[in-house]
Amino acid sequence: MRIVVGIKWVPGTQSVRIDPKTGTLIREGVPSIVNPHDLPAAELALRLRDKYGGEVIAISMAPPPAAKGLEYLVGMGVDRAILITDRAYAGADTLATSYVLANAIKKIDKEIGKVDLAVFGQETTDSSTAHIAAQTASWLEWPYIYYVRNAWLTEDGKLRVERILEEAIEEWEIDLPAIINVAMKSLKPRPVTLINKIRFKANPSIMMSWTNNDLKLDPRCTGLKGSPTVVAKTVDVPEVPRKKQVYVPKNGEDAAKWILKSLLSDEKTSKALIKALKEGGEAA
């Protein structure tokens, strides 16, 4: 079973800046990490490989520094990794990104071996669109299931998945090849191990790098040129000043009195609170 798992290299902080001209993230000077919601997806891919055999290939469309993120996945146990990087892919929205990823999967399928399954995280911490898995499936014309928390093969070679919704747990059966989106926090990712880190250092060819010379995609369909999403305007939200007060109450009643007294002691807060109480009373 050959499984491709997609990851994203995201800012490791909530203090991100937006380029006012392009509407894209400014990554320079910002420390980055593997998107935390992609790690459960990697864990599920590894569990399937451990159970049924085969290999897991991690891919990421990102600038060169994202190689560190792929190295982390190798440390978790993926068999090999592919960094898809080219200036022609810069500034891509989800449509252009999924187009590149779909073509990378096609290339793996053709040149490395048949891809049975592609696995993605639910969403990313820097955009939270949750579009990539579905759009990649659309480009490939593969069946797609989201919010998966477990998966296994049936006797006739189909994929059976368990997915979790707000008020229900469902089971679905789909033909392979397919794409699944793994629910965030649904699985605990395994740690990086020393033996896997040694394996990577001993064999750097585990990680490959593909550019547009390899994928041969029309530049008009990638990066900013291939992105129909338009950021019309960005607004910086000022940081809200905090008083950082600490109070140790004697009991719940004492805590409630202190909170109310603190709110009413601030003129702006007290006016807003009184207004809200009046409007609530009138509505009732």
Image (tube, helix red, strand yellow):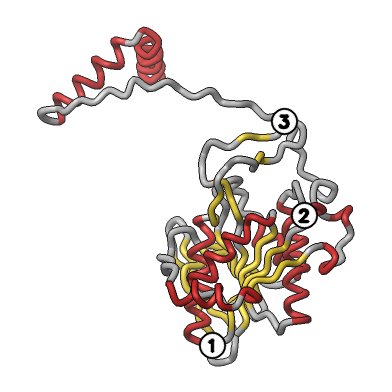
- Mark 1 or mark 3: name the one nearer the start of the chain: 3
- Mark 2 or mark 1: name the one nearer the start of the chain: 1
Say whether residue 215 is visible.
Answer: yes
Relative to 115, 86 lies left or right = right
Evaluate if marks 1 and 3 touch, with contact meaning CB atoms under 8 Å apart. no
Residue sitting farthest toward the bottom: 155
| Position in image of residue 217 (x %, y %) | 86, 63
Could you tell me which residue is drawn at 62 percent across and 49 percent down? 129
- Residue 9 to residue 189: above or below: above
- Residue 264 to residue 93: above or below: above
Q: Which residue corresponds to mark 1?
A: 53
- Residue 13 to residue 195: above or below: above
Q: Which residue corresponds to mark 2?
A: 96
Could you tell me which residue is drawn at 74 percent across and 64 percent down? 138
Regarding mark 1 in the picture, which secondary structure is present there? loop
| Position in image of residue 103 (x %, y %) | 78, 68
Regarding mark 3 in the picture, which secondary structure is present there? loop
